[in-house]
Amino acid sequence: MPKKQPLLTVLNILSALLLTGALILILFFTPVEAQMGAVQKVFYFHVAAAWAGMLSFVVAAVGGILYLAKREMRWDWLSLASIEVGIMFGLAAILSGMIWAHPIWNTWWVWEPRLTTTAIMELIYLAYFILRGALNTPEARARLGAVFAIVSVITVPLTFFSIRLYRTIHPVVFVSSGSTAFTMSPKMWLAFASSLVAFTVLLAALIWNRTRLAALQAHAGQEEN
Amino acid sequence: MNGFSNYLHTLWQVFRKDLQVEWRGRQGLPVMLVFALLVVFLFNFALQLTPGLQAGLAAGLLWVSLAFASTLGLNRSVSLERENHALDGLLMAPADRSAIFFGKTLSNLTFTSLVALVLLPVFSLFYQQNMLNPRLVLVVLLGLGAYTSLGTLLAALSIQTRTRDVLLPVLLYPLALPVLIAAVEATRGILAGQTFAELQSWILLLIACNILFLAAGLLLFDTILEE
């Protein structure tokens, strides 16, 4: 049986600590934004979740490339794990974005580039699971899943770019000019950076655990999608 | 023959074979055409379109019809090879398998362009806008090129599943979204009288999609077909 690495335990505990730390910073340390009020605090975890989602899909494509190059199942497990975890982070980003958008834009849903791209990304990776579910052997699932993960990662930036060209009303955080931009105080930056670090570590921990689960399932002879 | 001319020969033969099969059977193109026209009629009533509709709606409608009709052709193009194990024969061709991809993409592009060739005058007639414009034809070719290269790749993927061709739209539509957005916007711009310079971003995006999807096919098609 594949043994649990001590580093994984460390990573699990670390991600719990970092997440709690970031939450404390956001709730008690950051100022309430002047115009948007308390709901602005959704922003920290919202952007962090979106970042983690994007990153996980890149990891999935890298896993796909490594699988095709080396033909070792562990790279497919990595790819599969990343996409599963990425879908959940993407969903968290969409839902938190909607919670923020409701009072600020006065609507739950806006056809805004980042939100729309994230939603389409979710659809793309749901199709990934439908594809895997319709294939018979672990080898075919790994091989064609890898191809799909690679092609998907090519189109996601194109989708983002095209929707962005199409229209944009999303607040741009890293540019100080423009009507929808808002500037962050040093305390806000600290909370933001902590959230990003916490979510990145959490992402690594989740992917690793899920990869390990796939390895254990293969070991026990109960292959799934 | 050296490697490259061998490759081109295989590509050409796949293309020629697809055209020949279609010419003799006439089973793909008529279905695509009728389906595309049906989509036009469905949308006409679903969206309460009037003859004087805006350029934007006509552009969107054109691309939705083309995208839907192309899906039928793409599916047929690969399911044809599953019948009677024709694919096994194709795989024995003494060239890299991406030659099959390029040949198939070319034949799919030909079929979808023929559908577009019928749709453009029909749209001009129904919606009283001149769509027989050389610049628009170029945009249509660029859009269909990107769409069919991605579509050929994904059709080869979906045909290997238990659900066969049912899967293609679910795989293709979300991934083809940038192509459709760029194609619709470029078409809308041209119908509104904008120049290529004004539509530069969209045209460049379409060219980029063409290059990326053809490169993806070149690198990945062999992997998709291996069994």
Image: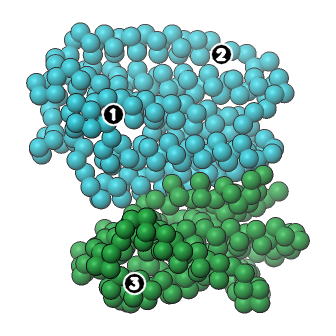
Chain colours: A cyan, B green
Q: Which mark is residue B96?
A: none
Q: Nearer the viewer, residue A165 or B43?
A: B43
**Chain containing mark 3:** B
Q: Is residue A64 above or below residue A197?
A: below
Instruction: Tell me where residue A177 appears, x and y as whole percent.
Output: 11, 44
Identify the mark nearer the N-term, 1 or 2: 2
Q: Amino acid at mark 3?
A: Phe
Instruction: Tell me where residue B144 appears, x and y as whole percent.
Output: 50, 75
Proximity of marks 3 and 1: CB atoms separated by less than 8 Å: no
- Position of A216 compared to B70: left or right? right
Quadrant in the picture for the C terminus of chain A:
top right
The answer to whether residue B218 of the structure is visible from this angle is no
Q: Which residue is mark 3?
A: B126
Q: Residues within 10 Å of mark 2 (few under 14, many from 20)?
A: few
Q: Residue at x 28, y 73 (%)?
A: B54
Tell me the element at label 2. loop
Instruction: Tell me where residue B76 appears, x and y as whole percent.
Output: 71, 71
Q: Residues within 10 Å of mark 1 (few under 14, many from 20)?
A: many
Proximity of marks 1 and 2: CB atoms separated by less than 8 Å: no
Instruction: Tell me where residue A174 appears, x and y as whole percent.
Output: 22, 39
- Position of A149 compared to B199: left or right? right
> For the residues marked 3 and 2, what is the alpha-carbon distance in whole angstroms?
67 Å
Between disc 1 and disc 2, the foreground one is: 1
Q: Which residue is mark 2?
A: A5
> For the residues marked 1 and 2, what is the alpha-carbon distance in whole angstroms?
38 Å
Q: Residue at x 39, y 35 (%)?
A: A94
Q: Residue at x 81, y 74 (%)?
A: B90
Q: Is residue A205 above or below residue B180?
A: above
Q: Which residue is mark 1?
A: A98
Q: Amino acid at mark 2?
A: Gln
**Chain containing mark 1:** A
Q: Is residue A207 above or below residue A166?
A: above
